[in-house]
Image (cartoon, grey):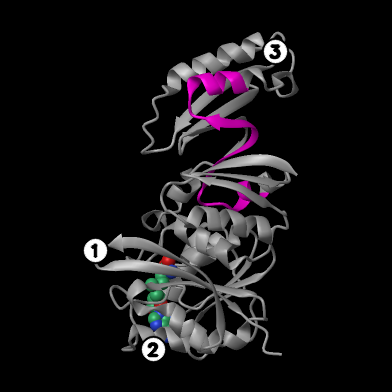
Amino acid sequence: MAKLFFLLSGEHESLPLSELQAILDTEGHAHKLLERLDQVVRLETDLEAVEALKRRAAFTRICALELFNCDAKVSAIVKSVRSTNLKDFLKENESFAVRVKHVKEHSSEVNGMILERKIGELLLENTVKTRVDLRRPDKVFVGILTSEKFVFGLKLAEIAPKPFVERRPRRKPFFHPSAMQAKLARCMVNLARPRAGDLVLDPFCGTGSMLIEAALIDCRVVGLDVQRRMARGTLRNLAYFKIKPEGVITADARRLPITKVDCIVTDPPYGISSTTLKRNMKQIVEELLTSVYTLLSSGRRICMAAPKTLKIVQIGSALGYKHLESHFVYVHRSLTREVVVFEKVSTE
Ligand SMILES: C[S@@+](CC[C@H](N)C(=O)[O-])C[C@H]1O[C@@H](n2cnc3c(N)ncnc32)[C@H](O)[C@@H]1O
C-alpha cells in the first residue's frame, strides 16, 4: 500500500469522493481513507489504483504519491521538503517541474509562484545533477494548498476533462434537451459499480448518455426508450462513438423485454422536456423500481436520478431496496436532482 492523494473536482461536494471510492472498490483496490480535505483526499491504496482511476473517473483531477503533508506555512513547508529523501524520487540527470495549486476559496497567505520557486531550489540543492524543465519534465511534483494544509507529492496522473467536454450532449449527433451531461452520467455509472463485461441497462435511455459512458469503460450495454425516435437517436449516438450495444429497444420500462442485467443506471423523465406517458413522477419511479427488481441479482445496484422533492429514498426502501447513498445536484431554481444508489438485498 502507498500513501496517495487526489485532487478532486470542485463541481460537487460529495460525488467526487464517492465516485473515487466506488471505482477502487469495483476494481478490487483495497483502500484506507486517511484524511478528507477540501477537494483533496488522502488515502492508502496500491499504485495500480491510479490506472483504474485514469480509465474510469469523471471527477478526479490529479493522482499523486504523497511525500509529505504539513501546515500551509512557508517555514513548515521548507522544513518538510528538507527532511524528505528527495533522491528517492528524483534521480541523477532527471529534469523536473514543481506545480503548486490553491483549492478555490482558500486564500492562503502563501504565494503559489514563490513557493514553486522555493521548492524547486530545494530540490536542486538536495539532489544530484537534476534540472528544472517546465515544458517536458521527467517528473512533476505537485503541491496543493487546501484546508490550511499543504499536501505535496510526485504526480502520477492528471485526468484531462477534455474527453467529457467532447461528449457534451450538444456535441453528439443526436441531441435532446433532456440529455444528461457526460461527466454526471459517467459518475452515475461508476456509482452503480459495474465491472468490465457487465451488462448495464438504461431503461429510459433518451440520447444514450449513460450507455455511452458505461460502454467506454468496457461494459456491455442495453437501452430502452418508449419513443422510437429516441431509441433511434441513441443508436446514432452509440454508432458515433463506435459502440455496439447488446440492444436498443423501443419498449416501455414497465414491461421489460429482458430478464437479467448486472447494473441499472438511469434518469427517468421528469415531465419537463421528455414524455412521461401521463404518469406522475412517483408512479414512474415506483413502476420502474418494481419492474427492474427481478432483473438484478442480490448485491447489485441501481443508480438513478430524480427530483429531490420526490423523496425517492422512501419509495425505494418501501419496495425492499437498501438505500446506500444520496447526492443532491442543483440544476436550476426549480430542479435539484437527487442521485441515489440502491442495492438489491437478498430475500433469503
Ligand atoms: C430524462 S430522459 C433520459 C435522458 C437520458 N438519460 C440522456 O442522457 O439522454 C427520459 C426518457 O425516458 C423515456 N420514457 C418515458 N417514459 C418511458 C417508459 N415508460 N419507458 C421507457 N422510456 C420512457 C422518454 O422518451 C425519454 O427519452
* Position of 79 relative to 194 (above/below): above
Taking the spot 34% from the left edge, 87% from the top edge, the residue there is: 277
Which quadrant of the view contains residue 292? bottom right
Quarter containing ligand 1? bottom left
Camera-side mark, 1 or 3: 3
Which quadrant of the view contains residue 256? bottom right
Residue 186: horizontal and vertical position, in percent? 52, 59
Which comes before the other along the chain, label 2 or label 3?
Answer: 3
C-alpha distance separating marks 1 and 3 = 55 Å
Amino acid carrying mark 2 in the image: Gln
Residue placed under numbered mark 2 in the picture? 283
Which comes before the other along the chain, label 1 or label 3?
Answer: 3
Residue placed under numbered mark 3 in the picture? 127
Tell whether label 3 touches label 1 (CB within 8 Å).
Answer: no
Q: Depth check: 34 or 142 in front?
A: 34
Residue 189: horizontal and vertical position, in percent? 55, 64
Secondary structure under the numbered disc 1 in the rendered image? loop
